Image (spheres, grey):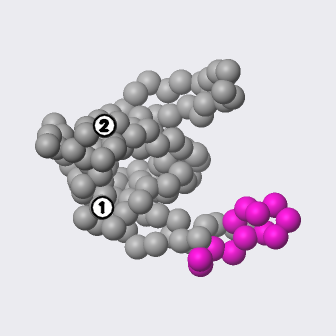
Amino acid sequence: MPLPNLIHPIRVVVQQIDTAATVYDPDTREPVQQAARKTNVVLPGQPKWVSEESLGIARAGSSPSASGYVLFRMVDLTAAGVTLRLNDRITMQGHLVDEVYIVRLQPLGHYPGQNGASLIRAWFADRLPAKERYS
């Protein structure tokens, strides 16, 4: 039963959306002001930054642009009790303090012994580059 490893894993800090504590507008079903976040979760991940691409249009609809991705192992996510979702925030990648949001999830590494995907690629994008906080 093969279990893939990350080549160069680093510490990635993820803040998940707390939907129970977030106040939503009843008409638009969107968060009022800012979505509430859970506490930081530190996970091993393998990030890769790619060149900025514009919004692509395909047969299935539009695909959002991404600044890069972080590759996570499903066993690490399961051990930490984390299920990644769209709009989760990544606040730190190794020594780099940033504020990027997950815009797409791509399951990878389907091995028979793993009962499905053993890796997940979390594509991220920066929403407000003018409001980044650097410490």
**Residue at coordinates 41% horizontally, 60% vertically from top-left?**
83
Our reading of the magenta stretch's main secondary structure is: loop
In percent of width and height, residue 114 lies at 25, 47
Alpha-carbon span between mark 2 and mark 1: 16 Å
Residue beneath label 1, please?
78
The vertical placement of 41 against 63, above or below, is below
Taking depth in this image into account, of 64 and 108 the one nearest to the observer is 108
**Residue at coordinates 69% horizontally, 75% vertically from top-left?**
23
In percent of width and height, residue 129 lies at 54, 44
Q: Residue 91 appears in which quarter of the rendering? A: bottom left
The vertical placement of 83 against 119, above or below, is below
Q: Quadrant of the N terminus?
A: top left
Q: Give the range drawn in magenta.
A: 20-31
92 relative position to 102: left or right: left
83 relative position to 117: left or right: right
Q: Is residue 28 magenta?
A: yes
Label whose residue precedes the other's in the sequence (2 or 1): 1
In percent of width and height, residue 56 lies at 62, 23
Query: Label 2's element?
Result: strand
Taking depth in this image into account, of 113 and 85 the one nearest to the observer is 113
Q: Residue 46 appears in which quarter of the rendering? A: top left
Near mark 2 (Cα within 10 A), the count class, few <14, some 14-19 or many ≥20, is few
Q: Report the disc number at residue 60.
A: none
**Residue at coordinates 76% horizontally, 63% vertically from top-left?**
29
Q: Is residue 24 magenta?
A: yes
**Residue at coordinates 41% horizontally, 35% vertically from top-left?**
68
Q: In which quarter of the image is the C terminus?
A: bottom left
Query: Label 1's element?
Result: helix
Regarding residue 42, the answer to whether it shows in the image is no
Amino acid identity at mark 2:
His
Near mark 1 (Cα within 10 A), the count class, few <14, some 14-19 or many ≥20, is few
Residue beneath label 2, please?
110
